[in-house]
Image (spheres, rainbow, N blue to C red):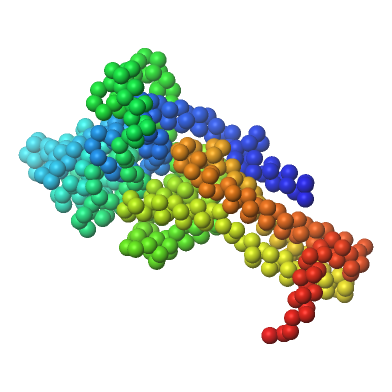
Amino acid sequence: MKAVSEAINQQVSTAQGGPQSADSATAPLRARLNRAIEVMQEGLIERDTEVRLLLLAALSQEHVLYIGPPGTAKSELGRRLSRLCAGSFFERLLTRFSVPEELFGPLSMRALEDDRYVRQTEGYLPKANVAFVDEIFKANSAILNTLLTVLNERLFDNGTDREQVPLLCLVGASNELPESEELDALYDRFLIRRQVSQVSDAGLLAMLAAAADNSLAGTGLASHRSSGSEAAAQESIALTFEECQEIRQQALRHVSVPVEVRQLLADLRTHLREKIEPPVYVSDRRLVKAVGLMQVAAYTSGKDSVSLLDCMLLQHILWQQPDQQSRITDFLLSQISEDDGLQSASYILASIFSRACIVLTQKGENLASVLGEATALKESLVDKLISLKASQGVGRGSNMWISKQETDSVAGSLRPKLEKTRKAHEALLDEAITLQAVLENADSLGPLDIVDVLPKRWAEYLRGQDKPPR
């Protein structure tokens, strides 16, 4: 058992980016991204989660919606992302009376003379790499259809031509949630949703101190000012549009999505539909995009598969109302920490033990079959222990996109439950290894040797034999 435990620890170390991990190719990228997060956070108070989600969205080529009052650094975050991506930035505040020209550019008078309906898009949304649109849900029907195509397909119909839009990420902001059903499609285009609150009373002191020290104006949320050295540092971590595309493609190509993660997604959607009032609708598109985003998160964290802990990002993806986020978080924590498969594995082991007792007595040809089942059960338990030990590593860099505050909260909730589940699996694995060893040496062992090495299983077997048939 000690040798198996050491092997499990080695595999967990590999999965978490240990010395022998295969993630060394992404180590320089992670260093750049960590530095980028630091630069984007500079001068901002209590915006760690917002910064990480925004950068992850850009790498995944998805969009972010910030919901909150004015003066909470929503537009500043968009500007910082545009500087980091070294691309063109477009910013606009919508009103009920906004017209398409404000977003997509004015009509070309010269083209109209030639009977062509073409817009001058340079400097407008169709040419932007990063965009910030405030009061996004003020978009009227004249804007909406074109905006939906730009957000989802990255295409803009300009006259008779369909142009590619080089948009990495659009940051939408609103003081309130959409009220009209015609805005549901637009709301669904924002994969990541984050409620942004004012700085807390504890953080307020730090913000005011920073404002006083640096002579910052307004709310005290710093506008990033680059000195020569800062500009050079920012240039070293800048991400181009092509790089972001390549990162996403590599993630989708090389990061696997285990069955347990897919099952968790299915269970979560069922839970949101059947156990929450009012039911939470989650579109198929949103689920597929959520998987892609988690693949990017895993890849940039140095992993080759999505873990259950990566699913904690779903708390920022699947809610329709902000108060639903905590319920999603609670469900995810309960699913990650539950003893999934433990009872079933125990039943399977009891069945294999019962057959092993018969095989050892009769020395029949079924020995190979029973041994194969015992070996398969052992390997399954080893895989589960690897997953459990990796989950216990939360808080030690298992996912760079989960903020420190969220990591500490998850760790505090999970570790006691995971420790209990891990010990139960280790005890079951110990029995499975012992049974496998007995079967492998069946020729040199007597029928009663199994009693000496697995006395508790033997006692359970006898109790089962005493029960009258049903």
Q: Position of residue 173 (x, y in %)?
A: 26, 41
Farthest residue to the top: give it. Answer: 228
Q: Which residue is located at x 35 percent, y 60 percent?
A: 280
Residue 174's image quarter? top left
Q: How many marks?
A: 0
Residue 438's image quarter? bottom right
Farthest residue to the left: give it. Answer: 113
Q: Which residue is located at x 30 percent, y 37 percent?
A: 198
Q: Which residue is located at x 38 percent, y 51 percent?
A: 325
| Direction from residue 453 to residue 444 in the image, left or right | right
Front in this rendered view, residue 27 or 340: 340
Q: Is residue 267 above or below residue 382?
A: below
Residue 44's image quarter? top left
Q: Position of residue 91 (x, y in %)?
A: 23, 34
Q: Is residue 107 above or below residue 350?
A: above
Q: Which residue is located at x 34 percent, y 44 percent?
A: 194
Q: Position of residue 420 (x, y in %)?
A: 63, 53
Q: Position of residue 110 (x, y in %)?
A: 9, 35
Screen quadrant of the C terminus = bottom right
Front in this rendered view, residue 341 or 25: 341
Residue 85 appearing in the image = no
Front in this rendered view, residue 205 or 341: 205
Residue 263 appearing in the image = yes
Q: Is residue 449 above or below residue 81?
A: below
| Direction from residue 25 to residue 73 in the image, left or right | left
Q: Is residue 434 above or below residue 104?
A: below
